[in-house]
Image (spheres, rainbow, N blue to C red):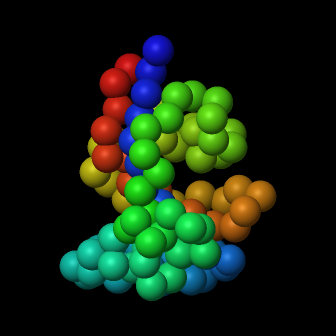
């Protein structure tokens, strides 16, 4: 069965999500921004969510994680929880 590992940053607005994405593009460390800004408890681990299979995360998140290129920051991804920046760190299909 397919598995992936990802990290994310969860914020409440699309504007904040886009701002953080720009900071990453300008050289900021994803993990540092996750620790500082993410409203998810995973932020304290740099946004790391560990390994999971399809169907374990909400649909919108799953679709990105199991299709996006590894190591490329995706987002904003809107879910019921807010707006995410997502980076797939590992996947086996």
Q: Is residue 10 above or below residue 62?
A: below
Q: Is residue 49 left or right of residue 39?
A: left
The answer to whether residue 19 is seen in the rendering is yes
Residue 38 location (% of width, % of height): 53, 75
Residue placed most toward the observer, 52 or 9: 52
Residue 41 location (% of width, % of height): 56, 67
Q: Is residue 18 above or below residue 79?
A: below
Residue placed most toward the observer, 83 or 37: 37
Q: Pick out the residue farthest to the top.
A: 1
Residue 30 location (% of width, % of height): 33, 71
Residue at (35, 32) in percent of width and height: 91
Quadrant housing residue 84: bottom right
Q: Is residue 25 left or right of residue 68?
A: left
Quadrant housing residue 40: bottom right
Residue at (45, 84) in percent of width and height: 36
Residue 53 location (% of width, % of height): 52, 29
Q: Is residue 27 left or right of residue 22?
A: left
Q: Pick out the residue farthest to the left.
A: 27
Q: Pick out the residue farthest to the right.
A: 80
Residue at (50, 35) in percent of width and height: 52
Quarter of the picture containing the C terminus is top left
User: How many marks can you see?
Assistant: 0
Residue at (34, 71) in percent of width and height: 31
Residue placed most toward the observer, 54 or 73: 54
The answer to whether residue 68 is seen in the rendering is no
């Amino acid at each position: 069965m397919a598995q992936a590992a990802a990290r994310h940053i969860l914020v409440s607005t699309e504007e904040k999500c886009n701002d953080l994405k720009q900071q990453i593009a300008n050289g900021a460390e994803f993990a540092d921004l996750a620790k500082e800004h993410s409203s998810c408890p995973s932020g304290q681990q740099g946004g790391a969510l560990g390994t999971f299979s399809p169907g374990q995360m909400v649909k919108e998140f799953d679709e990105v994680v199991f299709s996006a290129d590894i190591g490329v920051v995706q987002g904003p991804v809107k879910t019921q929880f807010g707006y995410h920046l997502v980076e797939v760190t590992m996947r086996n299909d």
